[in-house]
Image: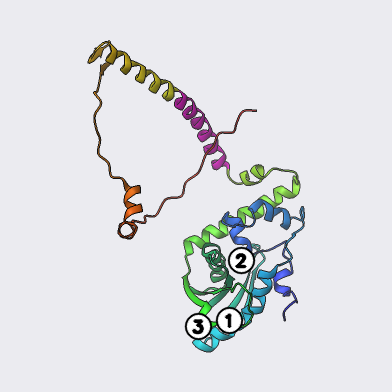
Amino acid sequence: MFGVKDINVVQHRDKLVGGSDVPAILGISKYKTQFQLAKEKTGIEPSEFKGNEYTTYGNVLEPQIREYINAINETNFQPATKTDVERGIRSNTDGYDQENQLILEIKTHGKTPDIRSYEAQMQLYMYQFGVEYGWLALYERPDNFDAEFDADRLQIKVVHRDDQYVQHILDAIETFWIRCEYLKEKPDMTEQEFMSVGQNELTIVAQQVEKLELQLASFKKLEEQYKAMKDKLYQLMEEYDVKKWETDRIVITRVLPGKRESFDSTRFKKEHPELAQQYIKVSPTAGSVRIKLKEAN
């Protein structure tokens, strides 16, 4: 019934990690960090989120979407809960069909659904319910929040269980609870201290990267000086009409000015946008870290 909190969702929230907590634990949440979640779980800070118009809308549409999916596909999805106290995890799925061995996750969303977070939740659910597949029901929320179900706004995405990803999630949750115990003992610890728990290798590598980054910063200054001296050297060789100069270790050759052809891609895209669009290549990029030196005080 709308307006009444499900006891499965709120009970023992401080002792169990739910699917909605997984994105924060994995560091992919747009709304909360793992450190913030830990402070809520340990009671250091109260959970301030009490719901909003988006969650209210989702609560209203969820049963309608589930009923429609069951009717169209002859499935029997019903809300269900699985709890593993030993691991400290709980899965509240929007639908579990025991006969077809499927789980259903319903998301009402705006223009850009957070698929990555949704699928992370579903991996935990599929693990706890012991199924290989799940249906992700994506319902695009209308601007006026019309609560009348519109089938044209619904699409279903089949999500496969990824056991390697599941193990990554379980390991991350285990580390999270260990960090929470340390946080209870030292409530004033910083986020960096919190995240370093269970990450000794990370700390060591980060320190090594720090040293290299400082060296690179000094090399950049040296490179600037080197470039300035090369420019000065060219001017002097040109002034005295010297084509080659040798020392005991290096040979310096003056290279005359010339021309280099290049393709003006900016102009081409501007003058021929449709043709340029045909040649756009999209390639996957590897994950990386961004490192920035702090300014000296």
Q: Name the residue under label 2.
A: 19
Looking at the image, residue 157 sits to the left or right of residue 188; the answer is left
The magenta stretch spans residue 201: yes
Which range of residues does the magenta coloring cover? Answer: 200-221
Question: Is residue 102 visible to us here?
Answer: no
Q: Where is residue 183 in the image (x, y as percent from the top left)?
A: 72, 48
Classified by dominant secondary structure, the portion drawn in magenta counts as helix
Q: Position of residue 54 (x, y in %)?
A: 65, 69
Q: What residue appears at the point 39 percent right and 55 percent down from the top-left corner?
A: 284
Q: Position of residue 128 (x, y in %)?
A: 57, 70
The magenta stretch spans residue 47: no
Q: Does dot 2 land on a helix, a strand or a loop?
A: helix
The amino acid at mark 2 is Gly
Eye-nearest disc, 3 or 1? 1
Work out whether residue 7 or residue 53 is closer to the camera in this orientation and state it. 53
Q: Distance between the residues labelled 3 and 1?
A: 18 Å
Give the number of the disc on residue 100: 3
Q: What residue appears at the point 31 percent right and 13 percent down from the top-left corner?
A: 236
Q: Name the residue under label 1.
A: 65
Above or below for 262 versus 178: above
Looking at the image, residue 180 sits to the left or right of residue 112; the answer is right
Question: Is residue 82 visible to us here?
Answer: yes
Q: What residue appears at the point 38 percent right and 23 percent down from the top-left corner?
A: 227
Looking at the image, residue 230 sits to the left or right of residue 106; the answer is left
Of the image marks 3 and 1, the number of the one nearer the N terminus: 1
What residue occupies the far left of the structure in this picture? 243
Of the image marks 2 and 3, the number of the one nearer the N terminus: 2
Above or below for 98 versus 249: below
Q: How far apart are marks 1 and 2 (CA)?
A: 20 Å
Work out whether residue 185 or residue 281 is closer to the camera in this orientation and state it. 281
Of the image marks 1 and 2, the number of the one nearer the N terminus: 2
